[in-house]
Amino acid sequence: MTSGIDILQEVLRECLEEKEARMVKANKAQPMTRQTEAGLEKWCSKCEAYRPADLDHFYQDNRSKTKLSSWCRKCQRASVGSSNKQSKPVKGNGDNTLVLDFSNADMLLADLQAEAVTDFRSTEMQALYLISKGLLKEANQNGRP
Ligand SMILES: [Zn+2]
């Protein structure tokens, strides 16, 4: 059986790829990276500024072409920090509760939180949205309406 985390991971990856493709299209005049005298710089789509394209300024993201996250470390940290403050601990009791364990998926959680911010949802809502999307897709692939 597929776990919620697996579905989330897959759907979120697709979502991010779609979004990145759209951004690349929209940002033709705004290149994701630029070469300066100081070295290569990468655009942070959150604070809308160029930062040195290295691991001191961006998190590693192997799914990205540049191998760096689309937000700079400062923005990603700020986003994770603020979402953590808002979210309450989830109690796993009853059939209506979905518990997602992100202990082995730090990057997934950060991506999810970043996605939630850009889509104006809470992290929990974003997780549910993506999981339902994934489940629907799975159902469609199995030939069910
Ligand atoms: Zn930034």
Image: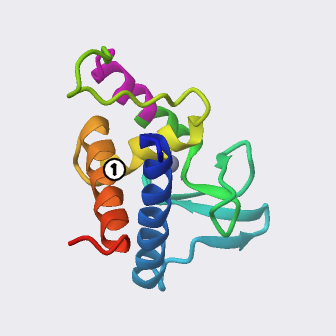
Which residue is nearer to you in this view: 29 or 101? 101
Whether residue 80 is visible: yes
What residue span does the magenta drawing correspond to? Answer: 80-89
Picture residue at 62% right of the left edge, 32% below the top: 104
37 displayed left or right of 19: right
| Residue 3 percent coordinates (x, y) | 46, 42
Magenta-drawn stretch contains 83 = yes
Which residue is nearer to you in this view: 72 or 121? 121
What amino acid is at disc 1? Ile
**SS class of the residue under badge 1?**
helix
Magenta-drawn stretch contains 35 = no
| Residue 98 percent coordinates (x, y) | 31, 30
Position above or below: 128 against 140: above
Picture residue at 49% right of the left edge, 69% below the top: 17
Which residue is nearer to you in this view: 32 or 90? 90
Whether residue 75 is visible: no
Q: Which residue bears the numbered disc 1?
A: 131
Position above or below: 19 against 26: above
